Amino acid sequence: MANSFIFVRHGQSQANADGIIADAHAKLTQNGIEQARTTANEVKGLGIKFVACSPYLRAQQTAETIAGVLGIDLNHIKIVEELRERGLGELEGNPKNHPGPWYTQADAPTLETKQHLLDRMNDALYKLAALADGAGRLLVVGHAISGFYLAEAAKGIRTVSEIGDDAQLGNADYVEIEFPKIGKT
């Protein structure tokens, strides 16, 4: 199994550009497409053979753009439902009125709980590890908040009380994430 994967936050969406909290249907801007192309060129030499992404449109568009630049058949993009962004409930579609870390740290009644999000990212890691097993180097496209929780889960974090300081990626930024050592039970 591969020891790590490359995680990329989606390129700029129209919701990002407008200062709106995105829902599942937010599309990339032209700038977001260019950001994805730039990222693809930066990761070209990393041996990426397979791409997985969130089911949200902006993540899929980013994944397709990167795969196209890397010469990866679009049929090799796998949608992983667990990679979707944190559920922000009634805030989606409205102006972003809080500082960025609030969306990672808050536990308000209309938000997906932080523990549920962390559990979902742990589930995503198992699916990603299975995808990477024998497929070659994996690139994963996701979102700011859930991506932060995915990185925390990969560190072995299992409860929200253990989560470190917020460290969200910018649009189309990427980071290498080590798969956790998953023992057989």
Image: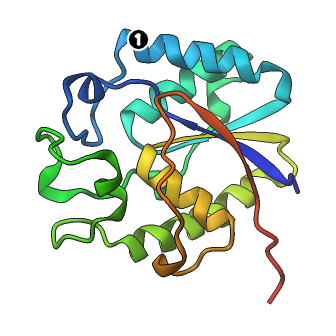
Disc 1 on helix, strand or loop? helix
Q: Residue 154 location in percent, x, y?
A: 67, 63
Q: Residue 117 location in percent, x, y?
A: 42, 67
Q: Quadrant of residue 21?
A: top left
Would you say 16 lies left or right of 149 here?
left
The residue wearing badge 1 is 31
Would you say 132 lies left or right of 164 here?
right
- Which quadrant holds the C terminus? bottom right
Q: Residue 173 location in percent, x, y?
A: 57, 30
Amino acid type for the residue under numbered disc 1: Asn
Identified at 28% across, 31% down, the residue is 26
Identified at 18% across, 41% down, the residue is 96
Q: Residue 34 location in percent, x, y?
A: 50, 10
Q: Quadrant of residue 66?
A: top right
Q: Give the camera-side residue of 98 and 88.
A: 98
Q: Give the camera-side residue of 97 and 171.
A: 97
Q: Give the camera-side residue of 120 and 113.
A: 113
Disc 1 packing (10 Å; few <14; some 14–19; many ≥20): some
Q: Is residue 27 above or below residue 89?
A: above
- Which quadrant holds the N terminus? bottom right
Q: Quadrant of residue 13?
A: top left
Q: Is residue 77 above or below residue 110?
A: above
Would you say 87 lies left or right of 119 here?
left
